[in-house]
Amino acid sequence: MHMELWATLAGYGSEPRGPPRSAQHRLYFKNAEGKYISPFHDIPLFAASEEDKEIPAKRSKINGSEVVFNMVVEVPRWTNAKMEIATKEPLNPIKQDIKKGKLRYVANIFPHKGYIWNYGALPQTWEDPNHTDNSTGCCGDNDPIDVCEIGSKVRSSGEIVQVKVLGVLALIDEGETDWKIIAIGMDDPEAEKIHDIDDVRKHKPGYLEATVDWFQLYKVPDGKPENQFAFNGEFKDKEFAIEIIKSTHEYWKALLHKKADGGAIKCTNVLVCGSPFCCSEEDARLIVQSAPPPVNGDPISTEVDTWHFLNNLGLTVLYSFLRQGLLQLLNWCLYVVSETGIVVRSTATVQQQPLLDSHKARFRNWAVGLAAAVLIAVALRAMEATTHSDAKLPAHKQSCRPDDMAPSGSSLQGQKFGNGTSQAITADAYSAAKFLEL
């Protein structure tokens, strides 16, 4: 059977089942022919591909110099409901995660609101829990590989977006490797000038540092410790990220051919030829029809209005900056050594001297900047030691939320952890500039 897969993804659609904002809610997927499919297994990894032998998306076409991937959006930016591909259900619809019998929402940790990117997964990838990653020393988390899409558009849950990969962050989540791919939609206005992780630092300063902080802290309001990272929280570049994607694609292929143990994962699919888990169109239709019909759901949880204030958050952000700065300084030193052999030497040739002077000047600027940041960190630590731990925010530093998410005058209940206090704040407007003023 020959299968044509589309370069444009307008043909993909979704069908809701069950009441929204409930444990029964599911979002099933269809292709352009109206067939019910699995977003985990039937949507190709590569945005423009043809079937090759048994596995779709084995070969990729190149868009200019970019390999373009498909991303399944699970959670739109600035929302809180932890939506995810249901890997343990037939056809793998999107559902809201449940913990201890309750729908799960990601906490708002000041100054963030929900997820700070469009969050989702790459189809036809799998982080094998039986394989120990050589670079992290930990096994996979038994899920498709996660994606943070950093474009300017707010996407929709269930949307299929063509993205180019920029880099990757290695989160260690409860002892498991949980890769976070950084990508940007090909239709984003900034996609033409952002090609690698360093371009993100240039055009979206602070975004990567905020990403590290978000993943480090997002479980703290639930009483869990901060998350850890491989590589000291350093983002790896595009080339490294693509190699990780390739390896997880190979693990997925093994899973679909019963060459790997996926445990409770459901591999039911409609389009993966040669897979023992391939089902008929009729079987897929019956799976969807067995789910409850879509009806009106419950009101959205007030939990999404809660803002959490963590002690030492300012220091955490500063330390993240210092960590990233030190890593960049180290990378620059290695670059200098590789380019010139030895950075400072008395026998430098006339041709080398201008390059050496440039490198030394840039090195000096980095050193001065980092020294200043270290002094600021020490000063803040000293100030913190002399400040009463339960001091409330001054009135002029009370913050706010987006108008479209909290009408003027609505109340937000913020909670400070550790030795802090609880404090209610009023939301009148949302301004990133005010966040920066803090």
Image: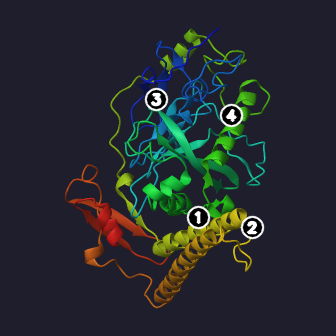
Q: Element type at marker 2? A: loop
Q: Is residue 147 above or below residue 136?
A: above
Task: Look at discs 4 and 2 and give the one toward the viewer.
Answer: 2
Tell me if label 1 and label 3 are in contact, CB under 8 Å.
no
The residue drawn where x is 29% and y is 50% is 405
Residue nearest the observer in this picture, 90 or 433: 433
Q: Element type at marker 4? A: helix
The residue drawn where x is 61% and y is 17% is 271
> Alpha carbon of mark 1 to alpha carbon of mark 4: how far?
29 Å
Mark 3 lies on residue:
27
Which numbered disc flags the more N-terminal residue, 3 or 4? 3
Which numbered disc flags the more N-terminal residue, 1 or 3? 3
The residue drawn where x is 29% and y is 71% is 398
Q: Residues within 10 Å of mark 1 (few under 14, many from 20)?
A: some
Task: Look at discs 3 and 4 and give the one toward the viewer.
Answer: 4
Disc number for residue 341: 2
The answer to whether one can see residue 311 in this image is no
Q: Is residue 127 above or below residue 344?
A: above
> Alpha carbon of mark 1 to alpha carbon of mark 2: how far?
41 Å
Mark 1 lies on residue:
226
Kind of residue at badge 4: His
Residue nearest the observer in this picture, 417 or 395: 395
Kind of residue at badge 1: Glu
Q: Element type at marker 3? A: strand
Mark 4 lies on residue:
249
Which numbered disc flags the more N-terminal residue, 1 or 4? 1
Task: Look at discs 1 and 4 and give the one toward the viewer.
Answer: 4
For this view, does 408 lie left or right of residue 37?
left
Disc number for residue 146: none
